[in-house]
Amino acid sequence: MVSGAIVAVTDSSAESSAGVVWHQVETRDPDTAAMNHSVHFDWSFTEKVDLGQLRHHQRFAFGAGESSSGLISDVE
């Protein structure tokens, strides 16, 4: 099994030139991940997508009232 993360955090208010348009967090504990990202990065959680037996995806935005820009997945 391989585990790990790629994380990029900055306090810069400058627009990123990386061109990233979607972010995905995969975890075995999506509820804790959602809480931590909300507390530390002020993420706002939008719709939850039910995948039936495959569990669900929780979409998020980087701020309240913004469009979804990623999801937290509990799909293994």
Image (cartoon, rainbow, N blue to C red):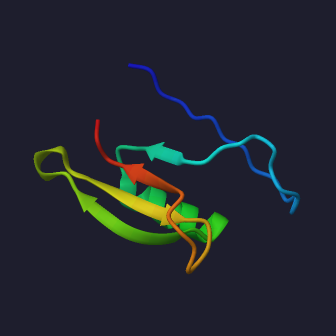
Identify the image quadrant of the C terminus. Answer: top left
User: Is 48 left or right of 6, judged from the image as shown?
Assistant: left
Q: Residue furthest left?
A: 53
- Which image quadrant for residue 42? bottom right
Q: Position of residue 46 (x, y in %)?
A: 42, 71
User: Is 4 left or right of 74, judged from the image as shown?
Assistant: right
Report the residue at 55% width, 80% height from top: 65
Q: Closer to the camera, 2 or 22?
A: 22
Report the residue at 27% width, 60% height from top: 49
Q: Closer to the camera, 32 or 22?
A: 22
Q: Position of residue 35 (x, y in %)?
A: 48, 66
Question: In the image, is residue 76 above or below residue 24?
Answer: above
- Which image quadrant for residue 6? top right
User: Is 72 left or right of 53, judged from the image as shown?
Assistant: right
Q: Residue furthest bottom?
A: 65
Q: Closer to the camera, 3 or 51?
A: 51
Report the residue at 61% width, 66% height from top: 62
- Image label count: 0
Question: In the image, is residue 6 above or below residue 32?
Answer: above
- Which image quadrant for residue 75? top left
Question: In the image, is residue 4 above or below residue 19?
Answer: above
Question: In the image, is residue 64 above or below residue 51?
Answer: below
Report the residue at 37% width, 60% height from top: 58
Q: Position of residue 34 (x, y in %)?
A: 46, 62
Identify the image quadrant of the N terminus. Answer: top left
Q: Closer to the camera, 59 or 5?
A: 59
